[in-house]
Amino acid sequence: MTHRPQSSFPWFLLAPLAGVLVATACSGGGSGSPTFSGTCTTNADCSEGQSCVDMTCETTTGSDGGSSSHDSSSCPNVECGGTCCASGQTCESGVCTSACANVECGGTCCAAGQTCESGVCQGGCLESGSTTTCSSTAQCCQSGNTQPEGAACISNDNLCHAICTAASDCTSGCCATVQGESYGVCAAASDCEGQVGSSCSTNATCASGDCTGLWCTSSCSSTNAVCAGGYGTGGLANEYGQYNWCLLNNGGSDTCFPGCSSNTDCAPFSGTTCQAVTDVTGYSTHVCAE
């Protein structure tokens, strides 16, 4: 398929210190006293009737008449240093700390480069593989683990795709050609199936809709002699690692033939051998032919 471009920190529970702080905070003089049981990060980590306070599950019986929130935490997530932490935060040394790698915003983690504005993640760039749509390549991240060679916004699905120059650059094994560009983009493996130079038996199995009965082909010309197969550097090779060539066929039309270097390369195309030819541009090469 030819694509169109839109051109956690470690923590340490200091039990003796925590006990001193709690005793001080709960010195209201009442009959209630907290019972400690295990560590936690949210109330969900504690047993029924307990609350997560400063990373410790506490059970309070009675009331000491004081103002300490240790009596019974009403925090939906976790209480830390006398305050309620937001969703997604943890208590680190008495301070609510975000578990997000970048910025937390409205209870969610923003992507790299984004900022939090009015509770909404804003700005930044879209990484390849993101399901957020794009309208231009400028919105796509141009560095990082998922797109070391940059990314491009592709109009087929309005998503950012990692730029590639070889099938090995993509986890899918498919480096699809991009119309009007020298680079390809990583796409689903299915996007490279039935491409020019792939074996076929019916037109329906070819992306071009044209099957010779042995391989998928397409029309070409001396000014448009690149018969890209969606694999290899720039997506120019076919699935067998060979380039396709534009030749004048027996019917008098310029069409694409799968290239080869030996008869073994022609095994996918029954009844063919590797033959020396000259393509429509005058270049001497070899293709599989009957």
Image (cartoon, rainbow, N blue to C red):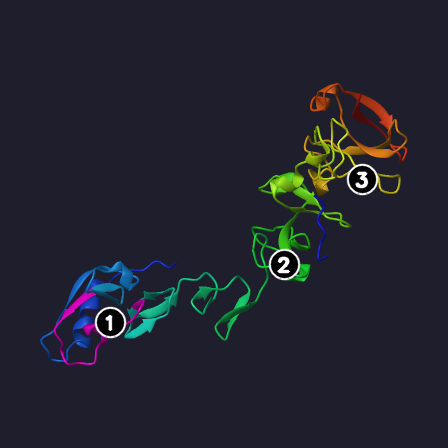
Q: Image point 63% across, 46% down: which residue?
A: 186
Q: Position of residue 198 (x, y in %)?
A: 70, 32
Label 3 near label 2: C-beta < 8 Å? no
Is residue 61 on the magenta stretch? yes
Badge 3: few (under 14), some or many (20 or more) residues near its Cα, within 10 Å?
some
Looking at the image, is mark 1 or mark 3 earlier in the sequence?
1
Q: Which residues are magenta?
A: 58-78
Secondary structure of the residue carrying numbered label 3: loop
Badge 1: few (under 14), some or many (20 or more) residues near its Cα, within 10 Å?
many
Residue 171 falls in image quadrant: top right
Is residue 173 on the magenta stretch? no
Secondary structure of the residue carrying numbered label 2: loop
Residue 79 falls in image quadrant: bottom left
- Identity of the amino acid at label 1? Ser
Q: Is residue 41 left or right of residue 164?
A: left
Residue 247 or 53: which is nearer the viewer? 247
Q: Is residue 58 left or right of residue 129?
A: left
Residue 24 or 187: which is nearer the viewer? 187
Q: Image point 31% across, 69% down: which residue?
A: 76
Looking at the image, is mark 2 or mark 1 earlier in the sequence?
1
Looking at the image, is mark 2 or mark 3 earlier in the sequence?
2
Label 1 near label 2: C-beta < 8 Å? no
Residue under circle 2?
140
Label 3 near label 1: C-beta < 8 Å? no
In the picture, the disc for residue 226 is 3
- Identity of the amino acid at label 2? Cys
